[in-house]
Image (spheres, grey):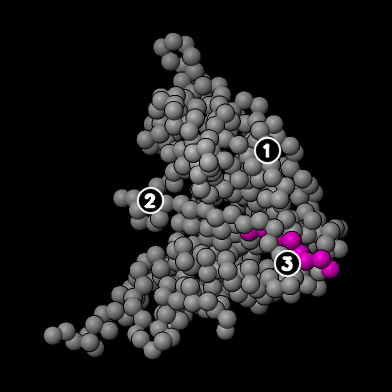
Amino acid sequence: MSDPVRENDISRRRLLGTVGAGATGLALGAAGGAAAYAGAAGEAPAALTTVGATGIAFHGEHQAGITTPLQACGHLIAFDLAPGAGRKEAAALMRRWSALASELMAGRAAGDGDTGVALDAGPSSLTVTFGFGRTFFDRTALVAQRPPELDPLPAFSSDQLDAKRSNGDLWVQIGADDALVAFHALRAIQKAAGDAARVRWQMNGFNRSPGATGKPMTARNLMGQLDGTANPKPAEADFDKRIFVPSEMSGTKYDWLAGGSYAVVRRIRMLLDGWERLSLKKQELVIGRRKSDGAPLTGGTEITELALDKTGPDGKLVIPDNAHARISAPEQNGGAAMLRRPFSFHDGIGADGTPDAGLLFVCWQADPLRGFVPVQRKLDRGDALSAFIRHEASGLFAVPGGARTGEYVGQRLLES
């Protein structure tokens, strides 16, 4: 016969040990909050697994969800301020949303009206990230504080953009390693918008779940390719310079953006039927990398630099001149770099049997005019991958730096 006291002690130690093993400094408190929430009905909460117990801090120099490792599921939502709503209403909304995000990311309930959807789960690496679109500054009479980097993106020849699913006054990115936790946050954010803002568009995405592979590895997209191999790494000396708006903005009219970043969001439809008819060799020539491990066709491992000048016995370039990896390489674009952090999507199958599937492309950079734009212009002129993708929606958002304790996101802008 088991000893319930001993079992409860073991359960408690498993919870504390799990939290300590794989979480941030916030996670212990977050898991404690989640455990109390899960056990609200009077039952002793079960120990959370590593995935459930891991929490991400809401407050900090940068918002979460930028350098956070890819999560298993996500939601992207754009809102427009309601007619008549302005700066005052926007400030109140950001105050509500920030307080709510802080609670949710700690694994706690969303106030008295909580739906109970995430009742049994911990934080599950939940992040909630907020950004402002170009039109937000018109609606709030803050045009003087709108940075020039928010000028509209140029048109690209491969664009087939749906205006109803593009842009927006406000943008929210939600990511988590549990689908119910992510949906819970989505629903709470939408409800908290109240009368101040209404949903313009919303998209749902996913990635491989943590622990699904024998070792951590770059995620694959729906074409089966490793996606994000050439991402700049936080350990690199110039990472912050490439990804985050410099602190030198302090003291200027754009100081509200110091420590922030710019997010380019694109819904990219993958024409999978045509792609999957290609032989493996032809797919690899389109990308310029081996499908099995992401290594360049010129040899090595995934992290080996591309040998762009290498030719084969036939005298032809081993990595074709129109290969995606060649054209998008930073050394081919004056060092332009962006941090890709996408989700895959699948929104059903059409009457013709064609899957509505692809990539919710999200990239981060200190300046989109030096990051996304020059690379996309070059891809637009001759990327072999262009025949198998279609850009269907687009958005550009200024993402403020993280909120300090006691602040809400965007406070330095809205109360300037």
The tag earlier along the polypeptide, 2 or 1, is: 1
Q: Quadrant of the C terminus?
A: bottom right
Q: Where is residue 118 in the image (x, y as percent from the top left)?
A: 47, 73
Residue shown at 47%/43% (left/top)? 221
- Residue that badge 1 annotates: 160
Secondary structure beneath dot 2 equals loop
Instruction: State how far apart marks 3 and 1 are (Cα).
Output: 27 Å
In this rendering, the answer to whether 372 lies above or below 52 is: above
Q: Is the magenta stretch mostly helix, strand or loop?
A: strand
In this rendering, the answer to whether 231 lies above or below 59 is: above
Towards the viewer: 121 or 201: 201
The tag earlier along the polypeptide, 2 or 3, is: 3
Residues in magenta, as a range: 77-84
In magenta segment, residue 79 = yes
Towards the viewer: 244 or 278: 278
Which residue reaches farthest front? Answer: 351
The answer, for residue 271, to whether it is visible in the render is yes
Disc 1: CA contacts within 10 A as few (<14), some (14-19) or many (>=20): some
- Residue that badge 3 annotates: 197
Instruction: State how far apart marks 2 and 3 are (Cα).
Output: 39 Å
Residue type highlighted by circle 1: Gln
Q: Position of residue 133 (x, y in %)?
A: 74, 55
Which residue reaches farthest top? Answer: 314
Q: Position of residue 408 (x, y in %)?
A: 68, 72
Residue shown at 34%/85% (left/top)? 44
Residue type highlighted by circle 2: Pro
Instruction: State how far apart marks 2 and 1 are (Cα).
Output: 35 Å
- Residue that badge 2 annotates: 216
Residue 84: quarter of image: bottom right
Residue type highlighted by circle 3: Ala
Secondary structure beneath dot 1 equals loop
The tag earlier along the polypeptide, 3 or 1, is: 1
